[in-house]
Amino acid sequence: MVKILCPTCNTEGYLQTLGNYHRIRHYVGIDPITKKSKFSYCPQTREYIDRILATQPEHLTTGIDLKLSVSNSNNGVEPRAGIEPATYSLQGCRSTD
């Protein structure tokens, strides 16, 4: 993830790209009941993201996977017997605020 300035709320957050959907994630705090981290999200246009990434120093964006995905590929390593490769999906995810 790349830390960038959000034009919507004028605070820094982390860029997330989900297919054709782009958003900036902001840490809100910890939920006092569940003790889980809470985040808010600001949707962004592809044009804004392209413009910002073009101005970022190369060392901040080189080699960074901006997509949140985990594939079934296990990079040639066989899992232990009885353990299936993990598959994650972001469908149905919502803001945690």
Image (cartoon, grey):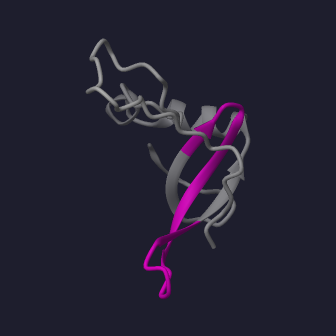
Q: Nearer the viewer, residue 46 or 17?
A: 17
Above or below, 72 against 5 in this view is above
Report whether 79 appears left or right of 39. Answer: left
Q: Quadrant of the N terminus?
A: top left
Question: Looking at the magenta stretch, what is its main secondary structure?
Answer: strand
- In the rendered image, residue 88, in percent from the top left (x then y), is placed at 53, 39
- In the rendered image, residue 73, in percent from the top left (x then y), is placed at 42, 19
Q: Residue furthest top?
A: 76
- In the rendered image, residue 92, in percent from the top left (x then y), is placed at 71, 50
Span of residues in magenta: 16-39
Above or below, 63 against 49 in this view is above
Q: Nearer the viewer, residue 60 or 32?
A: 32
Residue 38 counted in the magenta span: yes
Q: Quadrant of the C terminus?
A: bottom right
Report whether 6 appears left or right of 32. Answer: right
Q: Residue at x 53, y 33 (%)?
A: 67
Above or below, 31 against 12 in this view is below
Q: Residue at x 50, y 81 (%)?
A: 31
Q: Residue furthest bottom?
A: 32
- In the rendered image, residue 12, in percent from the top left (x then y), is placed at 50, 60
Above or below, 25 against 96 in this view is above
Residue 10 counted in the magenta span: no
Q: Residue at x 28, y 26 (%)?
A: 81
